[in-house]
Amino acid sequence: IRPDLRSYSRVSYQREIHGDLPGAIEAMEMAVAAGPPATEETAWAMLTLGKLYEMKADTAQAAQIFRELLQFRPDYPFATASLGDLAIQQGRLARGEQLLKEAIEAIPEVGFYISLAALYKNQNRTAEFEQLIPEILAMLEDDTVHGHDMRLEYAHLYRDLLDDPNKALEYARSEYERRPDNIDVNALLAEIYLDLKDINQARLHATKATVTQSSRPDILSLQKQLAVK
């Protein structure tokens, strides 16, 4: 009856997971417009809007939104880190590393450390990579101790950075037992089973991941690899 930032955001998410990316962007733009200026919730909505444009492969618009966000919240590390991730995707590795380190100086967010570790791994900077891993594991453990469920984060860490799909599978299967219909969990399981060359299990979980017709790049990639409709 009286839509606000929260309701527009929920509409955006529902549209996103059902494959309506233009509609998701439209609703999140309305969420940003409805939000009080310079508040945390409006900053979150702008960050999410930028991520939606990134999902659409419109990195120029995504970067513009992150920069606008930093104009009214210069100390917002999530926007800084997002610009760093974009810079790395575009091959501007030194700039991306600089921005990630700036974000880490502002707040010790585990996602920032993971992005930096991935950069070090891809550049074969083994000593710096190995130095970050214990810090990442410690932060994940701390989050777990404080009541956060970090099983998906552990699964991604072991698959994407530590090249241990069997360990990743343990965490992902544990989360699957709790949320068997979740598309994030099933998409990750499909990717892990692909790593393990178990095509039947990969196809099973990819089918569950595509049930909402999400247009996320990782899910579209699974559809293509496994010919899942």
Image: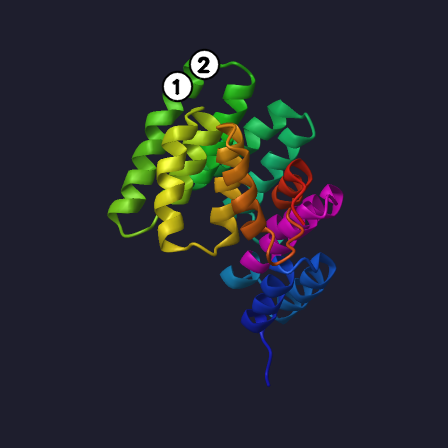
* Position in image of residue 38 (x %, y %): 56, 61
Whether residue 108 is visible to the viewer of this picture, yes or no, is no
Residue ranking furthest to the left: 145
**Dot 2: few (<14), some (14–19), or many (≥20) neighbours within 10 Å?**
few
Residue at point 70% right, 50% down?
53
Residue at point 33% right, 32% down?
137
Q: Is residue 156 magenta?
A: no
- Residue 126 circle label: 2
Q: Amino acid at mark 1?
A: Glu
Q: Is residue 220 above or below residue 101?
A: below
**Dot 1: few (<14), some (14–19), or many (≥20) neighbours within 10 Å?**
some
Residue occupied by mark 1: 130
* Position in image of residue 143 (x %, y %): 31, 45
Whether residue 145 is visible to the viewer of this picture, yes or no, is yes
Helix, strand or loop at label 2? It is helix
- Residue 72 circle label: none
Q: Is residue 54 magenta?
A: yes
Magenta region, residue range: 44-70
**Which residue occupies the foreground of this view, 107 or 141?**
141
Separation of residues labelled 2 and 1 (CA atoms): 6 Å
Helix, strand or loop at label 1? It is helix
Determine which quarter of the picture holds residue 105: top left
